[in-house]
Image (tube, helix red, strand yellow):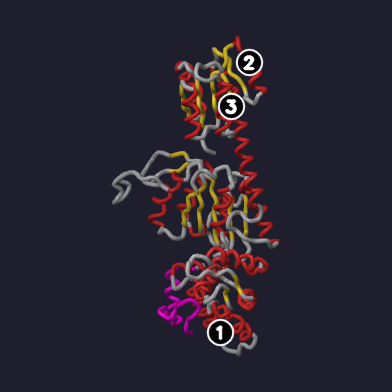
Amino acid sequence: MDRFRALVVDDEMSVCEAVKAILETEDMDIVTTTNSLDAIEHVKKSHFDLIISDLKMPEMNGLDLYEAIREISVNNVFIIITAYGTIPSAVDAIKKGIYDYIPKPFTPDEVRIPVRRALEKRALERENVVLRTQIETRYSFQSIIGNSPEMHETFRVMRHAASSESTVLITGESGTGKELVARAIHSNSVRARKKFVTVNCGAIPEGLLESELFGHVRGAFTGAVSDKRGLVEDADKGTLFLDEIGDLAPPLQVKILRILQEGEFQRVGDTQPRRVNVRVVAATNRDLKKAIAGKTFREDLFYRLNVIPIELPPLRKRPEDVPLLVNYFIRKHGSKNEDKKVSGISKEAMQAIMSYHFPGNVRELENTVEYAIAFASGRTIERNDLPKYILEDKKLSDEAQTIPLMPLREAKAQFEKGLVMAALIESGGNISEAARLLNIHRQNLQQKIRLLGIDLAAVSLGEVNN
């Protein structure tokens, strides 16, 4: 949660400084002014959770200041400072909406106690804002579309995750929207105003990932000419999203475990631990229990991550969501071209899409709709505007019913070749992305491409020569 901000207003600078000194021990940001009119300008320019004002001031008294600020902002708590002789006036002020009063002269506790109560009230108000946002977004959670029973359950768990500070592990096939879910949880949480920092654990080489994550000190290695903050520090007070956590090397798994257990880490080359307050959300398309059995993923880290598990269903298990998603993507991409606005889809085109299995899930469906919009000649997507592999999918399914008998080794080779080509089509020929889809290392995929005789130059969207 963000640090609370307080504005202290009193025509005596000594009182302002005394209140400021007391409140700085409460981990707050404090602004002071001796002028009521200046206080109003401060509120116009910046947000304050708490305003502490003297009741008796020359330009404008505390009650008038309270009324003036209420015209500008209602998202703050107001406390007045009053001399013992005017406490009855302070009681009247409380009846008008002022939260509490501080007697003058005051002891540190006479300032701290009402301020702590006031900030507890503000914390609850902040949480209520988050809850209201969750209710308003209902099943959408920003750009996440779905009305199937599977997605209703997913949204239910997401709402609980958003209202919690617990670690979340999101699992699901490639293209199901794991990062979108992670962002939705963050933006509906109490950390929403802080950073959401993404780390793709599978995209950064192991030798660089440690420095990227934790930073380094000057001289830690060749080229480390100055100290550098890591992504973990950037995410302090916010959310750290560890995408493809299943690809994280065991030595780095230990360091992530330390953050989760102790809230501590060390920069590369440093000997001093640093403290950090991050909420960790992780995602993977791997089976981490198999990875644990294979000794490539730490069991203790898995249980630390899997406090709130969210399993995203593949698109083939929620076919009723496909029309919703298609129409959403038409709205999203259909008006990008000023010369040609696409706003609908024909029944035949929708039937072709519904008949396809979408191994690349929602990401592949979005690419399909965007492709069709580019090829549409009118305002409606027609069947022939779809990628060829979508239209040929049913034909391939029919042919599969009459597969000729052949040696098992040959059949496996043909199946493997088809699977590799499907991944290459989905990734647009990007070997690294195709390897991720197939859940194998990039080098292994390159070797298979050579052994299977696949011509990469022939790979295009929907067309690969067998």
Quarter of the figure with residue 318: bottom right
- Mark 2 is surrounded, within 10 Å at the Cα level, by few (under 14), some (14 to 19) or many (20 or more) other residues, namely some
Q: Position of residue 301 (x, y in %)?
A: 55, 51
Expressed as whole percent of the image width and height from the top left, the position of residue 167 reads 58, 48
Sequence-earlier tag: 3 or 2: 3
Q: Which mark is residue 89?
A: 2
Callouts 1 and 3 close, C-beta under 8 Å: no
214 relative to 299 in the view: left or right: left
In the picture, the quarter occupied by the N terminus is top right
SS under mark 2: helix
| Residue located beneath label 1 in the image | 411
Badge 3: few (under 14), some or many (20 or more) residues near its Cα, within 10 Å? few
Name the foreground residue: 259 vs 155.
Answer: 155
Question: What's the residue at 57%, 64% (across, down)?
Answer: 331
> Residue 457 vs residue 367: left or right?
left
The answer to whether residue 442 is magenta is yes
Is the residue marked by circle 1 packed among few (<14), some (14-19), or many (20+) residues within 10 Å?
some
Residue depth check, mark 2 versus mark 1: number of the one nearer the observer: 2
The structure residue drawn at horizontal position 57% and vertical position 82%, both measured from the top left corner, is 392
Q: Amino acid at mark 1?
A: Ala
Report the disc number at residue 67. 3
Give the magenta-colored segment's residue range: 440-466
Q: Amino acid at mark 3?
A: Glu
Where residue 358 appears, x then y in whole percent?
A: 58, 72
Question: Is mark 3 in CB contact (under 8 Å) with mark 2?
Answer: no
Kindly report the distance in space between the C-alpha atoms of the residues bearing marks 3 and 2.
15 Å
Closer to the eye: label 1 or 3 = 3
